């Protein structure tokens, strides 16, 4: 009986989590040449690199990303409403990436076992009743920028 109750509580906790994940490759993509140029620009051509793309919902709050205690990104991105793009950077996909949002005081953690499988990771921020929620989309397709 205790296991059933704990299972229900754990399920509810996961469902109410402010971080949702999905895997998608079915959106309109950039051309192969655009993808190649983009990866070269962000120093993401190596197999040990993935690219984190901040999409919707960023309004100039400080976003910081760290790996093993070292800062790999620290800026104040603002989403371009026409392009739905705020910023992007490459990171080592063999190490845990921790993204901290100083405004919402939340952390998003991207584990290396998941990051290593995908070249592009999209992080979207939404607000539900003034609470920030995040959606992580793992993909091997660079959407049209």
Image (spheres, rainbow, N blue to C red):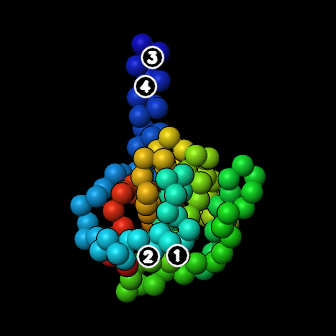
Residue placed under numbered mark 1 in the picture: 41
Disc 1 vs disc 3: Cβ atoms closer than 8 Å? Answer: no
Sequence order check, earlier mark of 2 and 4: 4
* Residue 14, picture quadrant: top left
Residue placed under numbered mark 2 in the picture: 37
**Residue 135: assigned label:** none
Q: Nearer the viewer, mark 1 or mark 3?
A: 1
Viewer can see residue 16 = no
Viewer can see residue 86 = yes
Label 1 crowding class (10 Å Cα cut-off): few <14, some 14-19, many 20+?
Answer: few
Distance CA(mark 1)–CA(mark 3):
51 Å
Q: Nearer the viewer, mark 4 or mark 1?
A: 1
Distance CA(mark 2)–CA(mark 4):
47 Å
Residue placed under numbered mark 4 in the picture: 7
Disc 1 vs disc 2: Cβ atoms closer than 8 Å? Answer: yes
* Vertical comparison of 85 with 4: above or below: below
Q: Position of residue 63 (x, y in %)?
A: 63, 68
Distance CA(mark 2)–CA(mark 3):
52 Å
């Amino acid at each position: 009986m205790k296991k059933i109750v704990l299972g229900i509580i754990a399920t509810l906790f996961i469902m109410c989590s402010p971080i949702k994940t999905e895997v998608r490759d079915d959106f309109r993509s950039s051309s192969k040449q655009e993808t190649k140029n983009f990866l070269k620009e962000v120093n993401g051509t190596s197999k040990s690199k993935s690219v984190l793309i901040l999409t919707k919902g960023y309004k100039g709050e400080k976003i910081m990303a760290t790996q093993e205690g070292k800062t790999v990104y620290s800026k104040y991105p603002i989403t371009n409403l026409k392009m739905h793009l705020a910023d992007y950077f490459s990171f080592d996909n063999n190490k845990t990436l921790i993204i901290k949002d100083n405004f919402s005081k939340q952390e998003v953690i991207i584990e290396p076992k998941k990051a290593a499988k995908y070249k592009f990771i999209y992080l979207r921020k939404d607000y539900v009743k003034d609470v920030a929620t995040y959606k992580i989309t793992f993909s091997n397709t660079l959407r049209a920028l």
